[in-house]
Image (cartoon, grey):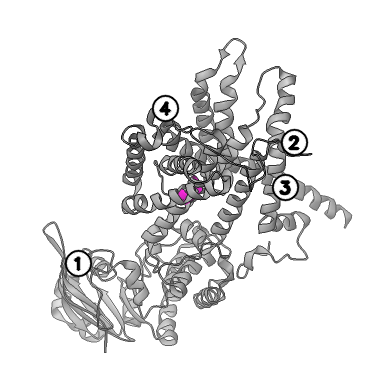
Amino acid sequence: MSGNGPRPNGGEILDPDASTIQRARALAQHNWSVILGAVIALLLFRWLMIDGLGMVADMVDVRIGGYEGLPSLILIYGIIVIGFNLLLGYVGLLSFGHAAFFGTAAYVAGIFSAEVSGSPLLMVVAGTVAAIVLAWPIGFLSIRRTGVYFAVLTLTFGQMLYFYALGPGAWLTNGDNGYSDIQTGDLLGSIRLDAPVPGLEFLLGHWQYVFVSIFMLLAIIVANRIVQSPYGLIFTALGENEHRVSFVGLNVFRYKLMAFIISAAFAGVGGSLFLIHESYIHPTTGLYWITSGDFVIMSVLGGTGSLVGPVFGALVFEYISNVISGVSLPVIGAIGSLWRLALGAAFVVIVWFLPQGIYGALKSLIGRVGRLIERQLNQTAGGDD
Amino acid sequence: MALLETQELTKQFAGLTAVDRVSLSVDSGETRAIIGPNGAGKSTLINCITGLLEPSGGTVLFQDQDITAHDSHDIVQRGISRSFQTASIFPGMTVWENVQIAAFGTKHGSFRFNFLRNRDSFSDVDALTEDILASVELLEDGNETAANLPYGDKRRLEIAIGLASEPDLMFMDEPTAGMSPEETQHTVDLLEELKEERGLTIVLVEHDMEVIFRVADRISVLHRGEIIASGPPEEVKGDEEVQEAYLGGVEL
């Protein structure tokens, strides 16, 4: 790339002299390519998880294939951690209370379905709005503090909601029995979410996967736009030198609060979808602090340095907790509840050897291969002269 | 006319009075140097004026308005920007982005809901960024990651960030500290240019006497938190109290 001069707007200007790979790189930064890439990935993801891994499983004779429902679950957590990472990876705020937004959205979506409307879209809207409304006061009270104090404050608010849902709020949440009075209706009045997609069942399975995929696509588009907007610049700057941000005349508190609310909105979308997906919610799965911790682990596992990195963390996390936990190995026997140990081992290995996370490692690998091909091509071109 | 005025400004830290009833008046268009030995309270004074520290007493008036203990971002929005002793930049961002973010603060206020619009589609912001980078001669390095700049360029980038706030008054905390003679020369030229072309009022804390005598219209001497002398360089240079307190009697 020509290193001199001001940055071309949006990186769209393609130098006619640029090599194919340089052009490909410039193109990869373009919005449309992000969307196109996401669509292709989503179209193939379910098949790869279930049928692709299923084939491998048949070959090695260990049950490591995915099951119907797992791809959607991974995408739901993926949506949450994309938003969570705007806060953690960009602004550098570590929240230990995002289960509050996830769980509240799930409960609100569930109660909304029973009391108002079973439209899946409206359920997601209701849950997300609830998460946003809740994030405002929690953020307002937590963001004045930084570092550990911020983390502990968010943790405390999350735990307050957990204990409320378990005990005093049982009239609303059905307490420790969990809330199961969920009346999810048809999508747009005519599509049953658990019905197969006609003609494309081999690829997409049930409508639920399509429904969740569309939200994942929206999450990527919106998060990408946020990162490309002035907010992206300001969020990154806040993570680098918060002090200086206030000394360029920007209101640090309000931008941090916005980052907090935006990330809570993503958690709200995820929580609502989780409820639709599971048709059941319990204070422990929804609001307990371990759930908040899982979001942190997923983000770090996938890599906090990029937008979609955390989705890879969600993938590995959910895969280990749902598939590897069911695997039975020779000598060791059933992994079962040892899955947290397996996850811990994976976490240590990744943090130790791949500090950029899974996605960061993949990206640098692809970059290295790209440069290698480029050098080969250059040599070939040089040989022609 | 006084652009900035402090009245009896005081800052105490647990019994230690770092800034002691400082009454300072800076005129529009002048370049003021604040000098004094280490620990005299120079940085504390600037921090109190720019909202980094809350004064224990006294008032700060800017354009005849009371800005005492206002938030830093509000003070910047009113027209006071600053640089820090350690180059305070955004090291992981490009040179262009470093200045662009300040230009957003200038052109779009302290807060906006513009989180779905591409940041490169704001022509007013881009024009300001380009103008500022050109004036500090860093436009060529726009794509460079700020952390990779040589030290002198980092300091100049910080000045550029300050300038992008389009200030009426700019505080500079030791702008030439740690610079090579060439870099110092470059910075002094830049300061003179800013003064002439932008009509910027500058208050600088500096140790390098050569720099001070070249750029300062007036000098204020701070000693143990108090201003002991204020006036044109020649006058301050000859002041016996200054020589005694600040230099221990050594000729300037």
**Labels 3 and 2 within one chain:** yes
- Labels 4 and 3 within one chain: yes
The location of residue B157, given as percent across then percent down, is 46, 68
Tags 4 and 2 on a common chain:
yes
Furthest-left residue in view? B15
| Residue identified by numbered label 3 | A370
Magenta-drawn stretch contains A297:
no
| Most foreground residue, A234 or A355 | A234
Amino acid type at image mark 2: Glu
Write the residue at 38% across / 83% down.
B200
Q: Give the residues drawn in magenta, as a range.
A: A263-267
Label 4 to label 1: alpha-carbon separation: 56 Å
Circle 1 chain? B
Q: Earlier in the sequence, mark 4 or mark 3?
A: 4
Give the residue displayed 44% in from the left and 78% down from the top.
Answer: B190
Q: Is residue A364 visible?
A: no
The residue most toward the top is A331
Q: What residue does disc 1 label?
A: B55
Q: Which residue is mark 2?
A: A201
SS type, badge 4: helix
